Image: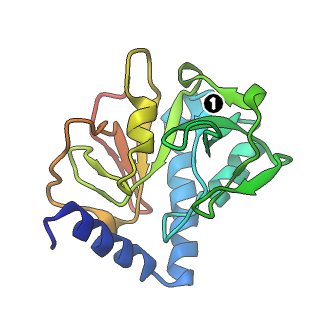
């Protein structure tokens, strides 16, 4: 297993991309069921999530279930005036979507639809790697860490992953924001007191 963070990212991204379309479909269904059964999901008001890219677990089955429950959802949006930042914006079945500079679909920017961090109760986060202590290896651009940094309340942070992304131990950087829980198609792992 590579120790350099960039080599580790490449290795883990290859692992998840190597999953067959059938394995990905089964994983996304299992993940949706595991999440919908969690009391944390039921108790949350607004839930922030992501649209899958590059072999990440696909949350669309979960999104459809949450829309049926009339849960308010939000997606990350690249800030139009600051390419280093993301904001979270309301996401509904009728949201106008555009592709950002990474080719990932996001709601078309509308200042009136952005949500302050304090209004998000639970955030499902993509990741490249994780360990049992809640350390998260992201893509390396730091968007989520910057968004979550600073004073004030923050949502319950749940990393979404395939089991092939689990690491024995992951060295964290000073700016890394640890997860409260990790969910895979096989399990829910609480790593911090979520109450």
The percent position of residue 114, horizontal first and vertical second, equals 68, 29
On screen, residue 75 versus residue 183, left or right, reads right
Q: Which residue is mark 1?
A: 46
Image quadrant holding the N terminus, namely bottom left
The percent position of residue 10, horizontal first and vertical second, equals 31, 72
Within the image, what quadrant is residue 78 found in? top right
Q: Is residue 105 above or below residue 45?
A: below
The percent position of residue 150, horizontal first and vertical second, equals 38, 21
Q: Is residue 23 above or below residue 79?
A: below
On screen, residue 108 versus residue 12, left or right, reads right
Identified at 76% across, 45% down, the residue is: 108
Identified at 30% across, 66% down, the residue is: 9
Q: Is residue 45 above or below residue 123?
A: above
Q: Residues within 10 Å of mark 1 (few under 14, many from 20)?
A: some
Farthest top residue in view: 152
- Disc tally is 1
Image quadrant holding the C terminus, namely top left
Identified at 57% across, 63% down, the residue is: 58
On screen, residue 122 versus residue 166, left or right, reads right
Farthest right residue in view: 94
On screen, residue 83 versus residue 91, left or right, reads left
Within the image, what quadrant is residue 60 found in? bottom right
Secondary structure at badge 1 equals loop
């Amino acid at each position: 297993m590579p120790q350099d963070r960039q080599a580790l990212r490449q290795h883990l991204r290859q692992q998840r991309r190597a999953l067959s379309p059938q394995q990905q479909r089964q994983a996304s269904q299992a993940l949706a069921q595991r999440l919908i059964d969690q009391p944390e999901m039921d108790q949350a008001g607004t839930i922030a999530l992501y649209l899958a890219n590059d072999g990440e677990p696909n949350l669309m089955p979960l999104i459809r279930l949450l829309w049926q429950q009339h849960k308010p959802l939000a997606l990350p949006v690249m800030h139009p005036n600051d390419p280093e930042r993301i904001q979270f914006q309301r996401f509904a079945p009728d949201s106008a979507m555009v592709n950002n500079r990474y080719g990932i679909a996001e709601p078309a920017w509308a200042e009136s639809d952005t949500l302050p961090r304090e209004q998000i109760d639970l955030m499902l986060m993509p990741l490249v790697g994780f360990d049992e202590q809640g350390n998260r290896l992201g893509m390396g651009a730091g968007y989520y860490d910057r968004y979550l940094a600073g004073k004030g309340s923050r949502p319950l942070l749940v990393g979404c992953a395939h089991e092939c992304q689990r690491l024995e131990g992951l060295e964290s950087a000073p700016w890394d924001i640890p997860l409260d829980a990790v969910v895979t198609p096989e399990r829910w792992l609480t790593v911090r007191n979520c109450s």
